[in-house]
Image: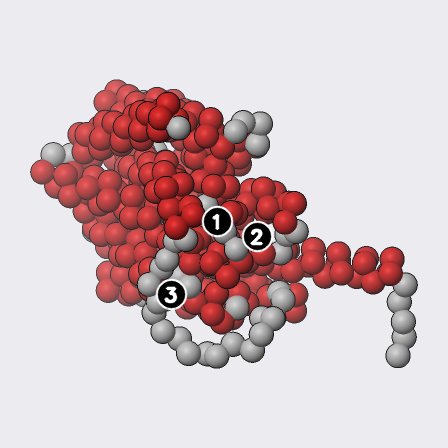
């Protein structure tokens, strides 16, 4: 057998580790991209299938249900089977969702596709976050947490922007985005097969739902983290619910790229928020993030009230920075602090909580819009999520004074 010097062996180990991180991150990115592809295309679906604001809201709601079900019922699956099999399953479901979107557009097919997309996102969000953190040494968990959030939010942002750009540049806006995503999903599956590490022990392959558990040592921090990051997601839910139809119906925009850009800006500036969080304590980052959500919601309400674009874009930017601060601090005080065997479950419980907070205001906007209009509904829920951000910030200040 050939022998290798320690230097060569170390180089190979580092290369294998880098390839594993790259493959896992790419699969995470591609899966999350697929979940937001329909966002800038809703105006086209509204014309072709007569989708109302409530219909769009229902489609968002069934996606969120898929996410939460996957996280709540199967969030600990990767702790039992290993990360790689669950990553494969998430990518496979993303591919199935893309295929369904390529079928003739009908509301039932759309609903099923969104549910499956939600299931893929739920499996990937919990497992992908845990898998990325697993692949880093203990002294680099902060960098691992940043990377996990970056590929998660980066995928969400790239999905909206790429679908919008493709829709404006091609004559098949409801086909090509999903073909591209399907090809990427196949490549992601191949990358996982080649480079993602296999489970250290042979899995039992007994798939059964298990209740998510949060270790007692972090439960207080966990509740605070879910409230902080969940409030950022609640503002994102309102922005996502109103932006595409607001641009089309009130600003007269026919640019699908612009519809994708609004959401993309939010997730792009979440990366900046993460970098900013590294220069602050986790407590300070979480507090500043929650406080910044108030002007973000205010700018959104201003845009809706005056039917202008600039405050809408500014709202997305401020929301991104605030969300990055909250997410970075929340992951640092929860998922990064538990042992590996609990990491998948804690990650899934965390994201289940914040996705519920994402869905509730988004659904509320659609329901209220039936009785008023989209602008009024958006303004009401902007005020509500701003109040939520203020409440969470005040609660943090009180807790810090008592500590």
Q: Is residue 188 above or below residue 216?
A: below
Q: Can residue 310 be seen in the rendering of this structure?
A: yes
Outermost residue to the left: 371
Residue name at image x 52 percent, y 76 percent: 203
* Disc 1 packing (10 Å; few <14; some 14–19; many ≥20): many
Q: Please give the label number shown on residue 335.
A: 1
Residue name at image x 52 percent, y 47 percent: 336
Residue name at image x 38 percent, y 65 percent: 74
Outermost residue to the front: 403
The residue at which mark 2 appears reads as 133
Q: Residue 86: percent from the left, percent from the top?
A: 48, 67
- Callout 1 secondary element: helix
Q: Residue 352: percent from the left, percent from the top?
A: 34, 52
The residue at which mark 3 appears reads as 74
Q: Are marks 2 and 3 in contact (CB under 8 Å)?
A: no
Q: Quadrant of the N terminus?
A: bottom right
Judged by depth in the image, the label closer to the viewer, 3 or 1, is 1
Between marks 3 and 1, how big is the CA–CA gap? 17 Å
Can you tell which quarter of the image residue 9 is in?
A: bottom right
Nearest to N terminus: mark 2 or mark 3? 3
């Amino acid at each position: 057998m050939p022998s290798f010097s320690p230097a060569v062996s170390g180089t190979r180990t580092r290369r294998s580790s880098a390839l594993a991180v790259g493959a896992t991150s790419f699969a995470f990115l591609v899966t999350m991209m697929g979940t937001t592809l329909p966002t800038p295309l809703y105006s086209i679906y509204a014309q072709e299938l007569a989708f109302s604001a409530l219909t769009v809201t229902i489609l968002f709601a069934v996606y969120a249900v898929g996410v939460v079900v996957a996280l709540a019922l199967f969030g600990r699956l990767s702790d039992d089977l290993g990360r790689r099999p669950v990553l494969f399953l998430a990518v496979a479901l993303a591919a199935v969702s893309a295929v369904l979107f390529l079928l003739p557009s009908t509301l039932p097919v759309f609903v099923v596709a969104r549910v499956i997309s939600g299931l893929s996102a739920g499996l990937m969000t919990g497992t992908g976050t845990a898998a990325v953190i697993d692949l880093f040494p203990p002294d680099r968990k902060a960098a691992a947490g940043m990377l996990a959030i970056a590929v998660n939010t980066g995928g969400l942002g790239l999905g909206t922007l790429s679908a919008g750009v493709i829709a404006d540049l091609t004559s098949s806006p409801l086909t090509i985005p999903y073909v591209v995503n399907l090809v990427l999903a196949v490549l992601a599956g191949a990358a996982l097969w080649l480079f993602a590490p296999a489970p250290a022990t042979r899995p039992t392959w007994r798939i059964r739902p298990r209740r998510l558990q949060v270790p007692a040592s972090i439960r207080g921090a966990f509740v605070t983290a879910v409230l902080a990051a969940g409030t950022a997601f609640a503002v994102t839910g309102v922005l996502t619910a109103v932006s595409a139809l607001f641009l089309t119906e009130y600003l007269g925009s026919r640019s699908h790229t612009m519809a994708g850009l609004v959401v993309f800006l939010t997730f792009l500036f979440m990366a900046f928020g993460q970098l900013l969080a590294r220069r602050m304590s986790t407590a300070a980052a979480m507090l500043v993030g929650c406080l910044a959500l108030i002007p973000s919601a205010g700018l959104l309400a201003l845009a809706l009230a005056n039917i202008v674009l600039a405050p809408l874009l500014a709202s997305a930017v401020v929301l991104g920075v605030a969300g990055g601060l909250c997410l970075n601090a929340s992951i640092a005080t929860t998922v990064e602090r538990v042992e590996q065997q609990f990491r998948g479950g804690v990650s899934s419980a965390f994201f289940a909580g914040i996705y519920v907070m994402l869905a509730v205001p988004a659904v509320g906007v659609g329901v209220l819009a039936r009785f008023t209009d989209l602008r009024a509904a958006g303004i009401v829920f902007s005020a509500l999520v701003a109040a939520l951000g203020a409440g969470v910030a005040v609660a943090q200040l009180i807790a810090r004074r008592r500590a």
